[in-house]
Amino acid sequence: MKIAIDSMGGDNAPKEIVLGAMRAVREFKDIKMILVGDEEEIAKHLTSNERIEIVHTKEAILGTDEPVRAVRKKKDASMVLAARLVAEGNADACLSAGNTGALMASGLFVVGRIKGIERPALAPTLPTIGGEGFVLLDVGANADAKPEHLLQYALMGSIYSQKARGVTHPRVGLLNIGTEEKKGNDLTKQAYALLKEADINFIGNIEARDLLQGVADVAVTDGFTGNMILKTIEGTAMSVFGMLKTALTGSMKSKLAAAVLKPDLRVLKNKMDYTEYGGAGLFGLKAPVIKAHGSSDANAIFNAIRQAREMVLHDVSGTIRDAIE
């Protein structure tokens, strides 16, 4: 299979993108990488071109660009070309660590939406204390949603968890302000009724405070709420580890304790590292499109490639299409 990467998108492009791609071809013998971007810049970091192809372009979409306008005007931008490779059948999936809005626009306008999907959803896999992780959708592809959209999110999240993550009977929960069936606003009450009748393992309403405990394999909500939850989790994790670092380096005594605890703290940090789970999939498109975090390093890019590979191997997009039909 071929996976196209926007090599110029993200804070650490192109170096970390190239390093992540080289690691991926070393570990996965069934993939070929297409690096889209400035060939001269990419070549500075490329030490092996085994199963790696470069599609040259000088144009790139910046983080400050207005997403839809940039996709329409910068037709030769690295992100747009990566999506076009997928649309034309020259790649099986694409990913970028660049402008999130522009990647969503590229997915919609270039790769295309599955017939019957009203609104694609942006869905990262986030860590849990037990290490299983859970899929959260939507986290910002659509600020507003209708009950029918949440039903489609639930179906897509369930299919992805089963096919790509190997969860036999994914538990699907509806994010709400309480677990009782009658709790919530009109959106969650109507969505609850639809999810209850759907052919999924719906476990009812769940609360945000229980997400990291692994209460569900798939958590469904509208994009506005999901984006705030995602950023709250990220911010809390950074704050907690920041406070730990301060506490463990404040005195000679704490530094000695930190030296003893270092291996255990590293295990804890790795367990709660979202980059180990890959990027955020844009579900509902004709082919896999993955959004890696803007600050992704080589390890995060590698895991995003691994995620794209799993989605292609298990035909997640095709399964979603069949389910919607």
Image (cartoon, rainbow, N blue to C red):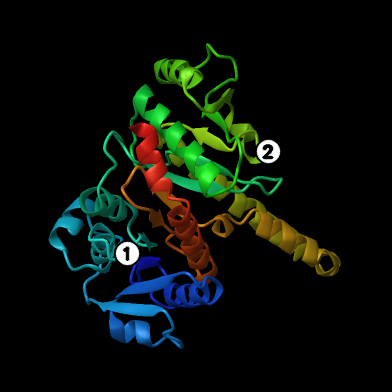
- Residue type, numbered disc 2: Gln
- The residue indicated by pointer 1 is 91
Q: Which of the 4 image quarters holds residue 262?
A: bottom right
Q: Position of residue 127 (x, y in %)?
A: 61, 48
Does residue 144 sit above or below 311 in this rendering? above
Does residue 79 sit above or below 122 in this rendering? below
Residue depicted at 45% across the width and 45% down the height: 123
Q: Position of residue 179 (x, y in %)?
A: 60, 20
> Can residue 246 be seen in this snapshot?
no
Q: Residue furthest top?
A: 182
Does residue 140 sit above or below 85 in this rendering? above
Report crowding for label 1: few under 14, some 14 to 19, many 20 or more residues within 10 A (C-alpha): many
Q: Earlier in the sequence, mark 2 or mark 1?
A: 1
Residue depicted at 33% across the width and 71% down the height: 8
Report crowding for label 2: few under 14, some 14 to 19, many 20 or more residues within 10 A (C-alpha): some
Which is more toward the observer, 131 or 161?
A: 161
Select label 2 or label 1 by which is in front.
1
Q: Residue furthest left?
A: 73
- Residue type, numbered disc 1: Ala
